[in-house]
Amino acid sequence: MTGIYTKLVSKVLFPLHERLKKHDTVTIKTQLEKSQWLAKDKILSAQNQRLQQFLIKAVDNVPYYKALFAKLDLNVTDINSVNALQKLPFLDKNTIRENFSDLKSNNIGTVSSFTTGGSSGTPLTFLLGNERVSHDVAEKWRATRWWDVDIGDKEIVAWGSPIELGAQDKVRIIRDKLFRSTLIPAFDMDESKLLGFIEQIKSIKPPMLFGYPSVFSLIAKLAIAKNIDLTQLGIKVVFVTSERLYPYQREIIEKAFGAPVANGYGSRDAGFIAHQCPSGSMHISAEDLIVEIVDQQGNVLPEGEKGEIVVTHLATSDFPFIRYKTGDIAALDLNDCACGRGLPVLKDIEGRTTDFVVSANGTMMHGLALIYILRELDGIEEFKIVQEALLHTRVEVVLASEHQLSKELRDTIIKGFKARLGEEVVIDVDIVAEIAAEKSGKYRYVISKVTC
């Protein structure tokens, strides 16, 4: 049963908040909650129609796509279905960097600059408009409601971006208090801080948790080891995102909290791609996102076969993402979901992972604590961090063209890493021509060989 305060937030305060920000979130969410129950073929038919409208805007208003269609001697009518998207080349991070200005629509509205977390080793700066943000928030809101929780219910958010954690200005603090959302930092997690998080969870008794699976698995592991019972707090669901969710993490989280884990797959650049429903399926937000699965040669694979995820986001008119390569691996499920929703299903998701590292004093911290040091430095194209031992970490760096590893840059890296890991830790910085893939063919950019 939804409480009175939750209804006040979800029906009055949050809609007012979104309206003031000029977001169409409420209207979109209402539409999404209806369209999810359509048959799959009707959802995909509507997707084709929306694709046509989206491409017309892109070719008319976006210099990059106007030039691309002219170069390929294509008309918008030539791309009359999702299958016909194969006539267009892929979009990747380098293409976006090289054509940043030309990817902006001539009719661009209010946009904000965003940068990816850099777990791939190659952070990307891009633009998000109100259209895209409204759809992203609406999709997350819809998925939240699948689990009998809503905006306005108490929640604890475990997050790791120092930029976001540092942006808690007065307005945002007031907003979070009104919406009953509590943020806990996913950095520097020694036992005492983990125990502090546990006490917060016990005190607040939130119906939902949201954040990194690695964070909640650490909390769960400690709670079980200390015989701390978290199963009677009324937690209905643990939403996890931003990292690959491993089966052992799901198992220990569900055991410790006595609640199901709901996985979410997506990224800042590609959007909220898929959310897990209570029946266990990862439903694609197909009203807004077209997902193709391609092999190493770029050929589109049939349903059921595993390959790289390529996304076309239909709510990115200000800065279009068309056939964007995510670098992650998955397959489209042949089977429909028992929940009855017609939304297509993504399975076998193998997103890039970010490990934890351990400081000299035994503090565990999210790998992003080190990634954020590197991603802000000019001249670094790619990187890989390997924690060889507690007192030895090695950093492989690929420099951008015409850049050299100056003493100043090397010292900045070493100083930043020592501040996180400890002054006694030896930091080696090695220049490499490229970052090699693992034997599996995937890339890992933070690897810790230290066991706790």
Image: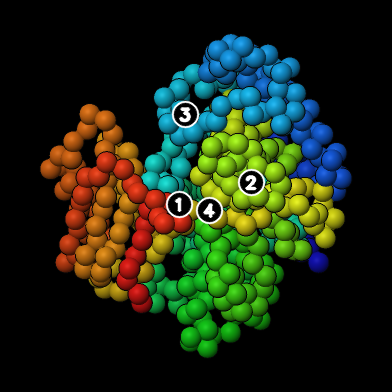
User: Looking at the image, is mark 4 or mark 1 nearer the viewer?
Assistant: 1
Q: Residues within 10 Å of mark 1 (few under 14, many from 20)?
A: few
* Residue in view at x 21 percent, y 68 percent: 391
Q: CA distance from mark 2 to mark 4?
A: 12 Å
> Which is more foreground, mark 1 or mark 2?
1
- Quick one: quadrant of the C terminus? bottom left
> Compared to 42, does 452 lie above or below?
below
Select label 2 or label 4 by which is in front.
4
Disc 4 from disc 3: Cα separation: 21 Å
In space, the residues marked 1 and 3 are separated at their CA atoms by 24 Å
Amino acid type, mark 1: Gly
The outermost residue toward the bottom is: 227
Are dots 1 and 3 in contact, CB under 8 Å?
no
Say which amino acid is labelled 3.
Answer: Ile
Residue bearing the label numbered 1: 441
Of 159 and 346, nearer the camera is 346
Residue type marked 2: Ile
On the image, numbered disc 4 is attached to which residue?
351
User: Of circles 4 and 3, which is in front?
Assistant: 4
The residue pinned by badge 2 equals 273
Specify which label sits upstream in the sequence, 2 or 3: 3
Q: Residue 243 location in percent, x, y?
A: 51, 57
Disc nearer the start of the sequence (4/3): 3
- Name above or below for residue 63 compared with residue 155: above
Amino acid, disc 4: Gly
Which x, y percent locates residue 166?
A: 41, 50
Q: Residue at x 33, y 47 (%)?
A: 435
Q: CA distance from mark 2 to mark 3?
A: 20 Å
